[in-house]
Amino acid sequence: MARVRDIGVDLGTSHVLICMRGRGIILREPAVVAVDKEQSRVMAVGEEAYRLVGRTPGSMQAIRPLRQGSVLDYDLVKTLLTEMVTRAVGRHVFSRPRAVISVPTGVNEMERRSIISIMFDAGMRRTQLLERPIAAALGIGMRFDEAYGSMIVDIGAGATDIAVLSMNEVTVGTCIPLGGDYFDDAIIRYVRKKHSLLIGERTAEELKINLGSAIEPADTVTMDATGRNLITGLPKTLPISSRDVYDALREPVNALIEAIQAVIERTPPQLAADIFEEGIILTGGGAALSGLQDAVYQQLRIPCAAAEDPQASVVLGCGQALENTPAMRALLSGTKRHWRR
Ligand SMILES: Nc1ncnc2c1ncn2[C@@H]1O[C@H](COP(=O)(O)OP(=O)(O)OP(=O)(O)O)[C@@H](O)[C@H]1O
Ligand SMILES: [Mg+2]
């Protein structure tokens, strides 16, 4: 039996989510740490630090310590996770919780060790790892224990996991550095080129969420975006249209769909036939991009649907994997005991 305080963790490039058995999601915060470089001090973590992104004065910097799902700064990831776990479950010196945490497809041994070590430092008794597509599939209640192919695409901020699952494992899978951040960069580049306006990451993300579409927008809406006029160097506000955002997102959307196609091409024919019949499920925050399911269908002629709360799929799957059943144990990897770096 899993213990009540055991937790499922999705440590993402843009968000950390934690769920607890019987209580569902208990924490969902941005994966951001604000640091004062001069004093080498952590000033804020999570939601509070996120508010500082792009608006920090002088020596203060708001940092996302993960890039494309990998640990970029060990100490800052440790600070982030320790704080998030403490916020979620409090400090328990005598009864440390067990955790299941998701990792990207194909993550190497060193990164696995480093995540486990960070979780130990963050107060876990034992940490087990779960591959992200498997976590996402469990989280949406997809069955993948038979010789039948199912496809899941988890579109995060830093990376996208594309996987075909069958017989309780990833049959064909890849993790590509093409997620929501890449979409935001495409919007920044487009607005700079077309309007000579340099906008920040936050503004680009707002444009994507409010106006973005992967299919041609039916009507044009606009949103005011403020940035730096590259000709005068002064701040300027311009209306950016949904057509602009659509044009900016065309290249990354096509690249994403081509990557899905490449995985299907590597899939054994019988499993590929199952996917053509059953369709593709999108999870991760990026799955919420308007029109994405239609764009996938238009290009690949495969039905496509998104999870209800796509950002939550992976953490919910980690929560499910805490159930200490033989079926779940078989999906997990990790150590009996923690090892240190
Ligand atoms: N409505 C929306 N349209 C388009 N993108 C969206 C929407 N809502 C959220 N996103 C994007 O989803 C991404 C965040 O998703 P998620 O929280 O699943 O990523 P993550 O798990 O932190 O990252 P990763 O899995 O790559 O480490 C961000 O890039 C965000 O801009
Ligand atoms: Mg993710």
Image (cartoon, helix red, strand yellow):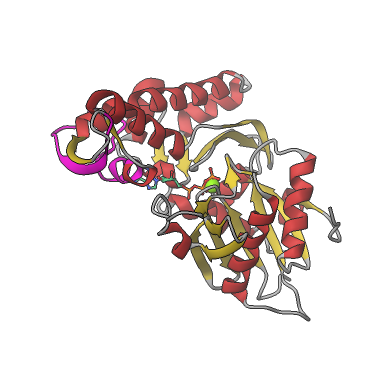
Observer-nearest residue: 181 or 324?
181
In the image, residue 332 lies at what x, y percent? Answer: 74, 51
State yes or no: residue 145 in magenta.
Answer: no
Task: Write the residue at 71% across / 55% down.
Answer: 328
Position of the N terminus, as image quadrant, is bottom right
- Quarter holding residue 234: top left
In the image, which residues are magenta?
204-230
Say above or below: 97 vs 11. Answer: below
Q: Is residue 57 left or right of residue 43?
A: left
Q: Is residue 301 visible?
A: no
- The picture places residue 266, in percent across and down from the top left corner, at 61, 20
Residue 28 is left or right of residue 67, and the answer is: left
> Is 87 in front, or is 312?
87
The correct choice, above or below, for 252 with respect to 124 in the image is above
Q: Could you say where residue 38 lies in the image, as x and y percent from the top left? A: 58, 57
Residue found 79% across the figure and 41% down from its top: 109
